[in-house]
Image (cartoon, rainbow, N blue to C red):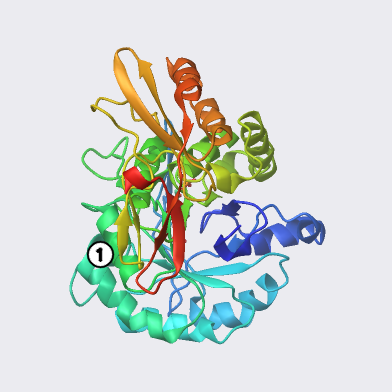
């Protein structure tokens, strides 16, 4: 895989799997069969934090709400006590950090920049900037300022963990990309609250409000991953309610290159192996030989190649409008493109995909969508080989081959 060279696409969501406690419980067996392709730590702050007063959890009909409040040992405690233990894990270590001042985040990043044990940093930006009062990850300008302070501190990959609690996560993701982030992860929890059952008008959670996670947020997360993917080219780690291989596949199709499991781990500690097995089956059933082939399938229309000074539609799926969003084409990485038309319920669908083999995979993923089989049959009948047009960036570096009339 391209993202951090992970062997497979499943990692843990920050704060939902305590690898040190798991090692205590399972001993070296944990190292022999570590459940994730990379380990993401709970958020580390400069100063130690106690976290929020109890109660800290509230169960929802389809999820969980927490107001844990990021208890942690602080930077010095983490470096002295936790890092040596986490360095023994057999997978890349991603340290999640947060600060309420840009300088604090820069200091945290600089401290980990020197540590060979750390493969990458994840910035938890769901925190207000004490100077501006703005949530760092809720405002593109605020995030740009943060990255300008942080980026020079390290050459390690920086992953910005986006918050769903803002007007436009895609705008924030674009700012992250433009200001040097190597990847984005999303979503963090959605803000919610629960009323106290006996004390009228009072919140149940000690922290007042909490973060909603689990299946309840999955549809929101999926939409945000897809929207972010349509704006940025840096890798996306998708999360939010993923509980099955099918869920994982959907996040990949929406544009993620890797997925994280969080709340599901509390209900099913065996979820990593189960989801991995289910995902393999889902991929196999659709003719994919690797998860990356499923990445970005759910993208319709124009793609932008960031940093390349060139914009072109890699795929042109529409003729006459009204095409169901499920009708998708996927190209770029494939050497031959074919083009054809299908008619479904009177709507002309213009497909341009990287080879019929890929079209089969695309249709397989949407086999439940009425008419898809018929569209593919027509498509295959009418498809013709077209010569490819190489697209180069401003320095003459080859980016992709596209069908000429889709440029
Ligand atoms: C109990 C709990 C603790 C969490 N702690 C953190 C944390 O320390 N840092 C962070 O960035 N996200 C934290 N999160 C958010 C998760 O990493 C994840 O973004 C979110 O829960 C959505 O994924 P899920 O629905 O699969 O849990 C926490 C979530 C839960 C449920």
Q: In this orientation, does residue 384 appear?
A: yes
The part of the image, by quadrant, that contains residue 40 is bottom right
Viewer-proximal residue, 346 or 274?
346
What residue is at 62 percent from the left and 61 percent from the top? 38
Along the horizontal axis of the image, is 369 left or right of 279? left
Q: In this orientation, does residue 241 appear?
A: no
337 up-or-down from 164: above or below: above
The part of the image, by quadrant, that contains residue 25 is bottom right
**Is label 1 in a helix, a strand or a loop?**
loop
The part of the image, by quadrant, that contains residue 131 is bottom left
Q: Residue 282: image x %, image y %?
A: 62, 32
Which quadrant: the N terminus?
bottom right
Viewer-proximal residue, 69 or 213?
213
Along the horizontal axis of the image, is 337 left or right of 289? left
What residue is at 73 percent from the left and 65 percent from the top? 90
Along the horizontal axis of the image, is 348 left or right of 273? left
Q: Residue 41: image x %, image y %?
A: 55, 65
Q: Residue 89: image x %, image y %?
A: 71, 67
Residue that numbered label 1 is attached to: 135
Viewer-proximal residue, 257 or 261?
257
Q: Residue 118: image x %, image y %?
A: 59, 76
What residue is at 52 percent from the left and 64 percent from the top? 42
Along the horizontal axis of the image, is 203 left or right of 400? left
What residue is at 24 percent from the left and 28 percent from the top? 321
Residue extending furthest top?
A: 345
Viewer-proximal residue, 154 or 43?
154
């Amino acid at each position: 895989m391209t993202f951090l060279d992970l062997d497979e696409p499943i990692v843990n969501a920050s704060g939902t799997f305590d690898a040190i406690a798991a090692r205590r419980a399972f001993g070296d067996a944990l190292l022999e069969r570590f459940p994730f392709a990379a380990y993401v730590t709970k958020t580390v702050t400069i100063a130690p934090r106690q976290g929020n007063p109890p109660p800290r959890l509230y169960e929802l009909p389809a999820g969980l709400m927490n107001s844990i409040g990021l208890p942690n040992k602080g930077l010095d405690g983490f470096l002295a006590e936790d890092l040596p233990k986490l360095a023994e894990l057999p997978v890349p270590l991603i340290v999640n950090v947060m600060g309420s001042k840009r300088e604090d985040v820069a200091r945290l990043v600089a401290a980990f920049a020197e540590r060979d044990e750390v493969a990458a940093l994840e910035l938890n930006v769901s925190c207000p900037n004490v100077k501006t009062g703005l949530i760092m990850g809720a405002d593109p300008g605020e995030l740009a300022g943060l990255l300008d302070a942080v980026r020079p501190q390290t050459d390690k990959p920086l992953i910005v963990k986006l918050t769903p609690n803002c007007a436009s996560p895609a705008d924030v993701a674009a700012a992250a990309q433009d200001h040097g982030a190597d990847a984005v992860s999303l979503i963090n929890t959605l803000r919610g609250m629960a009323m106290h059952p006996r004390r009228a008008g009072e919140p149940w959670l000690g922290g007042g409000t909490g973060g909603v996670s689990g299946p309840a947020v999955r549809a929101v997360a999926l939409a945000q991953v897809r929207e972010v993917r349509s704006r940025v080219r840096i890798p996306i780690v998708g999360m939010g309610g993923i509980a099955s291989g099918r869920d994982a596949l959907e996040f990949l199709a929406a544009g993620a290159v890797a997925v994280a499991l969080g709340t599901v781990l509390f209900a099913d500690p065996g979820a990593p192996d189960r989801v991995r097995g289910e995902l393999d089956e889902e991929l196999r059933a659709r003719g994919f030989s690797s998860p990356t082939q499923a990445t970005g399938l759910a993208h319709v229309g124009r793609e932008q190649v960031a940093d390349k000074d060139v914009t072109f539609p890699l795929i042109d799926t529409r003729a006459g409008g009204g095409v169901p969003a499920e009708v998708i084409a996927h190209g770029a990485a494939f050497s031959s493109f074919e083009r054809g038309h299908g008619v479904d319920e009177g709507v002309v669908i213009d497909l341009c995909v990287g080879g019929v083999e890929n079209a089969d995979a695309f249709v397989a993923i949407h086999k439940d969508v009425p008419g898809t089989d018929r569209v593919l049959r027509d498509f295959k009948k009418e498809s013709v080989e077209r010569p490819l047009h190489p697209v180069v960036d401003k320095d003459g570096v080859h980016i992709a081959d596209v069908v000429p009339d889709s440029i």
